Amino acid sequence: MSVIIIGSGPAGISASLYAVRGNIETSVISNGIGSLERAEKIENYYGFAAPVDGHGLADAGKAQAGRLGVRFISGEAVNLSWDGIFSVTLSDNTPLTADSVIIATGMPRRTPKVEGFKRFDGAGISRCAVCDGFFHRGKNVAVWGSGEYAAHEAEELSHIAASVTLLTDGAEPQVAFPDGIKIITKKITALEGGERLENVRFDDGDMLGLSGLFVAIGAAGSAELAAKIGAATDGGYISVNEDMETGIPGLYAAGDCISVGERRALPQIAAAVYSGAVAGMASVKYCRSLK
């Protein structure tokens, strides 16, 4: 029996400790330490006589997990699928499989501050090519982003849409994109349309007509990954119950990315560690039930 934990912050590491001690093969996908990166001084977390910085706390947690036998995989998860067993795809197309998955990738990404974004969010704007690409088959779409996740979404859409354009919003592409993907690096100033998104306007006045815009800025967020296999989300958070269970058997979430009913996660290390522990124990129980 095995579990994959996506995220190596406090929630992910906490989950891994309980999973591996439950005699479940445990792997953690690590793509940085999340919000701990910006934590210069932490003095409200149990067990430290003196303040500790984010890197120090993250290193201590990973060393503890490694000593217990947790396997760390460096990379970015860009896709999640399920057909009786979970499959996680990394940005280099490495496939990983497990009986259970715990998503612990932190806070949802910020909404781009561009005129029209909120208006068309859900009405032409999507965050999941696997989920919504079918609705734009044979039409012209765009992907907003410049990194590995954007490249993955563009590749997915290239098999469905008539054309795919990458919009980097002023940034240079960080990776190579599939052949046939047009790249526009101009700044985006507005999103326009009637009841649904119809055009993207750039800072030089040019416009791009499209059927859909897929947002893939930075890394794949928790809610985007969960939505790929039909787990419920709420405003960018993953909906879970008190046991950190989603509606998908074997899929759990923990940390800043969760919403329990109408209550969203308390963005504190102690709360992340707690939810990670609950998710880890729940995952162990689920894996044992499969035997």
Image: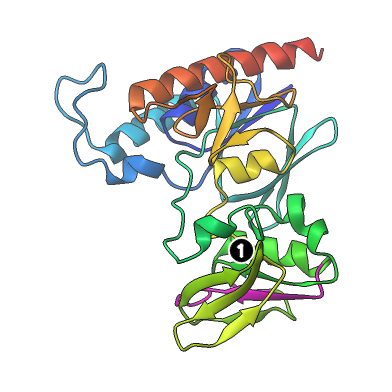
Left-right relation of 135 to 14: right
Image spot of residue 243 (x, y percent): 58, 14
Q: Is residue 10 above or below residue 202?
A: above
What residue is shown with label 1? 150
Q: Which residues are magenta?
A: 161-177
Residue 145 quadrant: bottom right
Residue at the image point whose x is 55% and y is 14% from the top: 242
Q: Nearer the viewer, residue 152 or 168?
A: 168
Residue at the image point whose x is 57% and y is 71% from the top: 192
Is residue 23 visible to the viewer in this orientation of the structure? no
Image spot of residue 178 (x, y percent): 71, 74
The three-letter amino acid code for the residue at tag 1 is Ala
Residue 157 quadrant: bottom right
Image spot of residue 13 (x, y percent): 47, 28
Is residue 176 within the magenta segment?
A: yes
Image quadrant holding the N terminus, namely top right
Magenta: predominant secondary structure element?
A: loop
Determine the secondary structure under disc 1: helix
Q: Nearer the viewer, residue 192 or 257?
A: 192
Q: Nearer the viewer, residue 156 or 94?
A: 156
Is residue 194 within the magenta segment?
A: no
Image quadrant holding the C terminus, namely top right
Q: Is residue 283 above or below residue 120?
A: above
Residue at the image point whose x is 77% and y is 58% from the top: 133
Is residue 231 visible to the viewer in this orientation of the structure? yes
Most distant residue in the front direction:
194
Q: Residues within 10 Å of mark 1 (few under 14, many from 20)?
A: many
Residue 251 quadrant: top right
Q: Is residue 178 above or below residue 98?
A: below
Q: Is residue 207 above or below residue 28?
A: below
Q: Nearer the viewer, residue 123 or 128?
A: 123
